[in-house]
Amino acid sequence: MTYYKIKTLVLESEAEGWRYNDKRGVYVYKGDVGVSIVNLHPDDTCRNEYSKPWVQRFDPKAYRLDFEIRYHGCFVDEFCMVLVDSGGAILPMPQGDTMDVSRDDYHLCQIVDHNNNMTEYFERAGLVLGPNERP
């Protein structure tokens, strides 16, 4: 499978099409178990703090979460999210100093949002859906 086919598969998938293992921090695509999304630091030990004015709307401590899309364990792509409100929600990281979030990152966040509250927090954060693709 090509890089573009895997990216398309992930970006066109539904959040319900993924199975999440909290202990391992792994999301496996039910339609092709060779496709996975891995939280590189599922525990609290290696998380990097994330500090931007918009996270102050929640608990002031926020953390950057690094994810990899993998195919049969091989690296395909990476993306970052932000853990806010003492772990209450995962949000897509805005681009630069804007509040714009790419549609791709928004969709990826819907997949990794195992708390099912991203939409509510997205609005509370004041984030805005921006250009389609990530830079």
Image: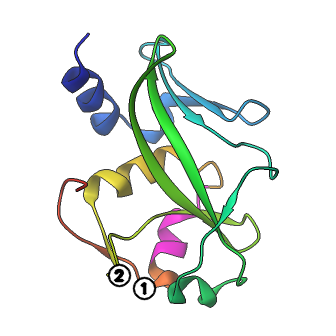
- The residue at the point 62 percent across, 89 percent down is 56
Give the x, y percent position of residue 6: 29, 23
The main secondary structure of the magenta stretch is helix
On screen, residue 33 versus residue 56, left or right, reads: left
Residue type at mark 2 is Asp
Q: Residues within 10 Å of mark 2 (few under 14, many from 20)?
A: few
- Horizontal side of 41 relative to 108 (left or right) equals right
Residue 21 in which image quadrant: top right
What residue appears at the point 48 percent right and 44 percent down from the top-left corner? Answer: 111
Q: Which residue is mark 1?
A: 126
119 part of magenta stretch: yes
Which tag, 1 or 2, sits closer to the chain's start? Answer: 2
Mark 1 packing: few (<14 Cα in 10 Å), some, or many (20+)? few
In the image: residue 37, left or right of residue 44:
left
Q: Quick one: 17 or 39, which is closer to the camera?
A: 39
Q: From the top left corner, tell me how far across and down residue 25 is, in percent.
A: 68, 35
Real-space Cα distance between discs 1 and 2? Answer: 13 Å
* Residue type of the residue flagged with mark 1: Gly
Image point (45%, 23%), residue name:
70
Disc 2: which residue: 97
Task: Work out whether 38 lies above or below 33.
Answer: below
State the extent of the magenta-drawn residues as a range: 116-122
Q: Mark 2: which secondary structure?
A: loop
Picture quadrant of residue 116: bottom right
Q: Secondary structure at mark 1?
A: loop
Quadrant for the C terminus in the image? bottom left
Looking at the rendered image, the disc whose residue lies closer to the viewer, 1 or 2, is 2
